[in-house]
């Protein structure tokens, strides 16, 4: 006997183990690299990979986005495109700095500067990529193909140089300016944050809510009431704001008179009827009133302080309808101060602590002084009410410190002049889901403020602006410019940076000195003498270039120094399309042919992050969108709906799931979830298991079924083409595959991944639960006739083609199946499923009429099974009759053609077809009282009686559009409701155009046949568990009750044929031993069964 062509398939499948083998194969055979080589001369499909921070390990959000980033490139590669897939790292910014502060056990800018910027930045460089090996392992393990060898890093000099070019281009368009504005500010990190960084850190928090009084200068008994949730801003109060058109009242309260908005009285007085209102006036009438300041720190600073003004933003939604103004600590406050020309008072330093201008709380973090400030106010009788409030408040997205709003000098990029172009470019982007285009993203552009692009930090791309004391500013756009402009200053800069090395030069050889400097990141070229040494930095981080000074070209006298800030790391990631290829210094043609990207994918938060900054910079530089297509994924939560938390341990780590259930199952779970439509997903290990059971296992079982029987019959594929002489069932599964391929290609071209998985599931269901189940006997039969060969060819074709179809989604499972079915079996077959072209729909293979017929049959069968299930009638219990009612003659004809199949599927003796449902239900009508009650009024009872008396014929006439006279008026079909009552012994189900009925009466003969069928099932299980081959002949010995024995005797031939038994012996057979055999139970009848292999071929 020859060796089987196909390797035997494991029955106890462990997908993670198979995946590990596939990973090894991919690596050893360079399959990813070969896929790139295969398409290297093809049209490019451009994919941008958003850079993650490398300071932590990947979580499910990364794996979700990474799966999207893998599926789309795999698909378009198989469609014949070359796709570069460079991984990138976001290396700068607060995430890295915060990690380094923890390492050094320091906190804040002062500690860092004391430590030394050089030491701090070099330490940041050293830890930036500490988790790269873990990232690479997990990214590879999830099946993502990505190029780590040619990764880009935002900290590399070529990348940073391109950022400088981007910055200078925008500067020259006059879109960058330095401004003094109120910004969200982190006191611990001592830096302002952008609006989209702030959006990442909102959370519910509880804080003080106080109402205080401001007596009028002219009459201290009259007091203006003000509500605030930031008591720490009261020492900086310089004005009060009212709404110009808001109605205010003077209220008598004991010896005091309070002024507050009329609409807010109910919040301060429970019984309004007892409130004594002395006067009512508008906000305009309050303007100009002078009041006594809460604190006198700035009482003598400006005579315009401490007066009432009006502002349009004041409302009566909360508080007293009067707002206290501290221009340094609120955007609206700042605008009021600017309008009035008031000087800004800001007694808070860069660490968020009070300065000596507020001596009582000098050195205290502002909001930590709230309680003491409130006590101070209360001690002076000016605290009217105190409570707490829970509200959404911004915290630093990196260090979790509560932010403050603080006036600060910083660098901005103008957004307003770009909005028209940004909105226009946004319309050229295909968003998935589509509502984001004009929703979250579009509205975000419309309301976007100018972008605060500078950070008062250290580890980042330095802002390339050198400033002279004379006021001149010079912007550097390249390293060449920097070298030319710094000129003679290079030597001194080098000495400052590397004083220890320079001191050693006199004692060391020039070559040794060169090595010393180069080790510190400095390019050197040496002449004979030290003074001729030219030192030029190849690193442009702060600790290097801040030493470089430029002779001012304007005044010709002063040396210009660089502004100390670094760029927002979002500016760096937004520059990725240009900086990753060092544009425009290199790769100009490469960039120009690859911009904008064809595809990107990230999480919903990036609508205010990377997607936004890409759009801002692309619109500013080229007036183009930066990308053409984007899939936006939602947020992954724990199963209980809470945020994933390492501390709470409310989720299984990704590697645990990968090792337990496999990457394919995890991938499919993620892309079959609401998360691929930007909705939240509650991660569930059970959900991953369910998708494995619904998709992976059924397809694997179909593959296993094929291999098992193909090996038994030594079947060898001649090619991988559908047979020309297939049965209707064969033609149907091929047509359905062709149609499914067309649908998947349509959805993939629109990036609708969420519509693809249901198509895969549906096809697998049709393949396993219909085609294979309906074809089993064709594979089981002993003769290798034409019908069996066609069945093998059909199943082989669909398994191989569908493996290609699923390969971008399930790269491991499909690779394992493809390699066993194809590699080495078909000449010139690629060694990997991923090196094949993606299947296309073939004209002439689709038969929609046949698909409709089979769909109707499956629907009818499903409805019949539902009736069985409803009345707990086992599938193996034969029943007398199944009735199908459908009014359309064409549909009825289609169903009639498949009568034998329906009989077999539903295990019924007869199938009856009809166009009139009254054969299984009694039909009557009743009045639609909601419609007719108003029409008939007192005659409604008479009308209802006549409607109930309508014949079936009259009801059908109404159904067909006719009118009938009832109680003197014409009525139509909408005026009645149809009642259906099932006939005795008949169970009915209606769905769409089909009505079906099942006769549930079980006769003695039917009962015995059902028992025989159950017995066959138990024997087949015993065969399987005994390790018998599917072709082995057996003898069955059974000791059982009389009822079961009679059933087996009556259906003996049927039982033997189904189980490949050459003999069936029941009760009292020679040599019977009641202690032997498998114990089974059928309809509460217990029996003992022995199954023995025999070499006898027949009885």
Image (tube, helix red, strand yellow):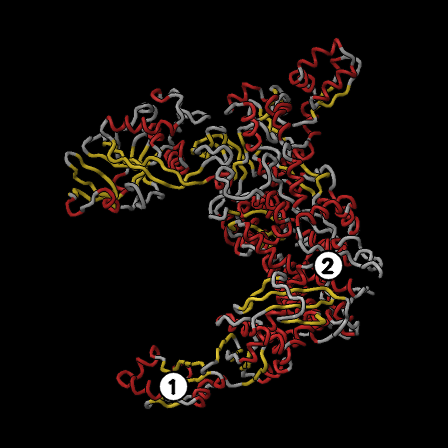
Residue 228 on image: x %, y %: 32, 36
Q: Quadrant of residue 825?
A: bottom right
Residue 980 on image: x %, y %: 43, 81
Q: Residue at x 62, y 23 (%)?
A: 543
Residue 806 on image: x %, y %: 68, 58
Secondary structure category for the residue under label 2: loop
On screen, residue 339 above or below 347: below
Q: Quadrant of residue 344?
A: top left
Q: Nearer the viewer, residue 1035 or 449?
A: 1035
In this image, 627 relative to 804: left or right? Answer: left
Mark 2: few, some, or many residues within 10 Å (few <14, many ≥20)? Answer: many
Q: CA distance from mark 2 to mark 1?
A: 59 Å
Q: Residue at x 41, y 81 (%)?
A: 979
Any part of residue 669 in sight: yes
On screen, residue 159 above or below 524: below
Mark 1: few, some, or many residues within 10 Å (few <14, many ≥20)? Answer: some
Where is mark 1, residue-wise? 971
Q: Residue at x 76, y 48 (%)?
A: 31
Residue 152 on image: x %, y %: 68, 38
| Label 2–label 1 contact, CB within 8 A | no
On screen, residue 879 above or below 457: below
Where is mark 2, residue-wise? 838
Q: Nearer the viewer, residue 666 or 1075?
A: 1075
Secondary structure category for the residue under label 1: strand
């Amino acid at each position: 006997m020859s060796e089987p062509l196909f390797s035997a398939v494991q029955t106890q499948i462990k997908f993670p183990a198979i995946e590990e083998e596939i990973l090894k194969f991919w690596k050893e055979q360079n399959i990813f690299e070969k896929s790139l080589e295969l398409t290297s001369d093809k049209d490019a499909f451009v994919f941008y990979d958003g850079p993650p921070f490398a300071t932590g390990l990947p979580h499910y959000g990364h794996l979700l986005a990474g799966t999207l980033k893998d599926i789309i490139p795999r698909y378009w590669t198989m469609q014949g495109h070359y796709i570069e897939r460079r991984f990138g790292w976001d290396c700068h910014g607060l995430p890295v700095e915060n990690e380094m502060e923890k390492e050094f056990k320091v906190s804040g800018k002062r500690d860092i500067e004391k430590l030394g910027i050089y030491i701090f930045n070099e330490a940041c460089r050293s830890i930036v990529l500490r988790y790269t090996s873990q990232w690479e392992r997990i990214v590879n393990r999830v099946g993502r193909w990505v190029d780590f060898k040619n990764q880009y890093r935002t900290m590399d000099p070529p990348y940073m140089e391109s950022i400088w070019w981007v910055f200078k281009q925008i500067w020259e368009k006059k879109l960058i300016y330095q401004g003094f504005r109120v910004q969200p500010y982190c006191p611990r990190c001592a830096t302002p944050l952008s609006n989209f960084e702030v959006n990442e850190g909102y959370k519910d928090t509880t804080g003080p809510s106080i109402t205080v009084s401001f007596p009028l200068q002219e009459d201290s008994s009259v007091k203006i009431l003000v509500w605030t949730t930031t008591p720490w801003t009261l020492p900086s109060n310089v004005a009060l704001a009212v709404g110009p058109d808001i109605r205010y009242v003077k209220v008598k309260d004991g010896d005091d008179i309070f002024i507050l908005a009329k609409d807010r009285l109910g919040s301060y007085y429970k019984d309004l009827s007892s409130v004594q209102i002395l006067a009512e006036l508008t906000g305009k009438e309050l303007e100009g009133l002078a009041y006594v300041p809460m604190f006198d720190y700035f009482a003598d600073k400006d005579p315009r302080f401490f007066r009432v003004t009006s502002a349009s933003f004041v409302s009566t939604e909360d508080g007293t309808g009067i707002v206290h103004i501290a221009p340094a600590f609120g955007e609206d406050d700042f605008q009021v101060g600017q309008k009035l020309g008031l000087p800004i008072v800001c007694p808070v330093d860069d660490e968020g602590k009070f300065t000596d201008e507020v001596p009582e709380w000098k050195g205290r973090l502002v909001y930590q002084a709230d309680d003491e400030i409130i006590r101070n106010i209360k001690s002076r009788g000016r605290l009217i009410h105190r409570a707490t409030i829970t509200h959404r408040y911004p915290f630093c997205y990196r260090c979790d410190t509560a932010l403050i709003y603080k006036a600060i000098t910083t660098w901005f990029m103008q957004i307003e002049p770009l909005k028209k172009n940004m909105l226009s470019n946004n319309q050229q982007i295909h968003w998935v889901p589509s509502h984001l285009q004009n929703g979250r993203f579009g509205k975000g552009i419309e309301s976007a403020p100018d972008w605060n692009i500078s950070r008062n930090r250290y580890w980042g791309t330095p802002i390339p602006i050198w400033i002279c004391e004379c006021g001149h500013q010079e912007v550097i756009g390249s390293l060449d410019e920097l070298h030319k402009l710094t000129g003679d200053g290079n030597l001194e800069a080098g000495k400052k940076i590397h004083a220890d090395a320079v001191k050693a030069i006199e004692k060391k050889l020039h070559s040794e000195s060169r090595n010393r400097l180069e080790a510190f990141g400095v390019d050197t070229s040496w002449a004979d003498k030290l003074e001729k040494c030219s030192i030029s930095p190849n690193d442009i981080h702060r600790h290097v270039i801040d030493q470089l000074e430029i002779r001012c070209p304007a005044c010709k006298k002063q040396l210009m120094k660089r502004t100390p800030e670094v760029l927002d790391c979002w500016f760096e990631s937004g520059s990725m399309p240009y900086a990753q290829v060092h544009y425009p210094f290199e790769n100009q043609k490469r960039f120009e042919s690859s911009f904008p990207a064809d595809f990107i994918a990230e999480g919903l938060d990036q609508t205010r992050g990377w997607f936004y900054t890409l759009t801002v910079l692309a619109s500013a530089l080229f007036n183009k969108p930066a990308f053409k297509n984007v899939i936006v994924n939602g947020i992954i939560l724990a199963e209980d709906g809470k945020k994933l938390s390492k501390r709470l341990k409310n989720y299984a780590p990704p590697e645990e799931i990968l090792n337990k259930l496999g990457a394919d199952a995890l991938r499919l779970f993620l892309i079959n979830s609401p998360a691929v439509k930007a909705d939240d997903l509650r991660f569930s290990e059970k959900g991953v298991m369910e998708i494995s059971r619904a998709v992976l296992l059924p397809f694997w079982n179909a593959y296993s079924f094929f291999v098992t029987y193909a090996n038994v019959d030594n079947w060898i594929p001649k090619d991988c083409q559908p047979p020309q002489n297939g049965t209707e069932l064969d033609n149907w599964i091929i047509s359905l595959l062709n149609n499914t391929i067309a649908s998947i290609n349509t959805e993939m071209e629109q990036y609708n991944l969420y519509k693809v998985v249901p198509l895969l599931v549906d096809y697998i269901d049709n393949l396993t639960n219909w085609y294979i189940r309906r074809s089993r006997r064709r594979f089981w039969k002993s003769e290798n006739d034409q019908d069996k060969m066609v069945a093998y060819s059909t199943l082989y074709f669909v398994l191989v083609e569908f493996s290609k179809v699923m390969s971008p989604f399930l790269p491991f499972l499909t690779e394992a199946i493809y390699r066993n079915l194809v590699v080495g079996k078909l000449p010139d077959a690629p060694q990997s499923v991923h090196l094949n072209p993606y299947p296309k729909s073939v004209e002439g293979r689709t038969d929609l009429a046949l698909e409709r017929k089979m769909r109707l049959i499956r629907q009818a069968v499903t409805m019949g099974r539902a009736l069985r299930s409803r009345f707990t009638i086992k599938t193996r219990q034969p029943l007398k009759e199944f009735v199908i009612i459908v009014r359309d003659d064409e549909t009825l004809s289609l169903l009639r053609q498949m009568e034998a199949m329906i009989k077999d599927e539903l295990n019924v003796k007869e199938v009856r077809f009809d166009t009139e449902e009254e054969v299984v239900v009694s039909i009557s009508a009743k009045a639609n009282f909601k419609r007719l009650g108003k029409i008939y009024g007192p005659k409604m009872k008479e009308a209802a009686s006549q409607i109930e008396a309508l014949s079936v014929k009259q009801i059908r006439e109404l159904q067909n559009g006719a009118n009938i006279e009832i109680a003197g008026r014409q009525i139509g079909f909408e005026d009645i409701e149809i009642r259906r009552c099932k006939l005795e012994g008949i169970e009915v189900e209606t769905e769409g155009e089909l009505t079906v009925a099942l006769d549930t009466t079980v006769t003695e003969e039917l009962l015995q046949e059902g028992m025989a069928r159950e017995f066959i099932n138990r024997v087949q299980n015993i065969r399987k568990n005994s390790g018998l081959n599917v072709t082995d002949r057996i003898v069955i010995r059974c000791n059982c009750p009389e009822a079961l024995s009679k059933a087996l005797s009556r259906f003996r031939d049927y039982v033997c044929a189904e189980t490949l038994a050459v003999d069936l012996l029941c009760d009292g057979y020679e040599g019977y031993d009641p202690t032997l055999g498998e114990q089974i139970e059928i309809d509460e009848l217990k029996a003992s069964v022995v199954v023995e292999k025999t070499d006898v071929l027949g009885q």
